[in-house]
Amino acid sequence: MPTWLCTFTFNKLKKYYDEQAEATKKASKGNSTQIDLNQPTKNAPPQTIQPPSYVTKRAKK
């Protein structure tokens, strides 16, 4: 590949990805949510399922 073509292709790709990064940054600028991973929201743990106190199978005779 000639040097000029390699440079041209590189610059076109760089420009494209820079524009994509800027568009993504603008889109997510106002809608950012910060989550503290050390202390996530304190939700109560789900209640454990207790086994039933009755038997559903018929007794063998």
Image (cartoon, rainbow, N blue to C red):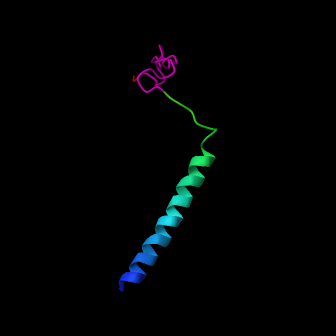
How many numbered markers are drawn?
0
- The single residue placed furthest to the top in the displayed view is 53
Which quarter shows the C terminus? top left
- The single residue placed furthest to the bottom in the displayed view is 2
Magenta highlight on residue 7: no
Magenta highlight on residue 58: yes
Residue 28 x/y as whole percent: 60, 44
Q: Nearer the viewer, residue 38 or 11?
A: 11
Q: Which residues are magenta?
A: 36-59
Residue 15 x/y as whole percent: 51, 65
Residue 42 x/y as whole percent: 50, 17
Residue at the image point whose x is 41% and y is 23% from the top: 38
Is 30 rendered above or below residue 54?
below
Q: Nearer the viewer, residue 44 or 12?
A: 12
Report the predominant secondary structure element of the magenta stretch: loop
Which quarter shows the N terminus? bottom left
Is 13 rendered above or below residue 24?
below
Tell me: 36 left or right of 22. Answer: left
Q: Nearer the viewer, residue 4 or 60?
A: 4
Is 1 rendered above or below residue 18?
below
Residue at the image point whose x is 51% and y is 16% from the top: 44
Tell me: 19 left or right of 58. Answer: right
Residue at the image point whose x is 63% and y is 38% from the top: 31
Is 5 rendered above or below residue 22?
below
Residue 4 x/y as whole percent: 40, 82
Residue at the image point whose x is 46% and y is 71% from the top: 11
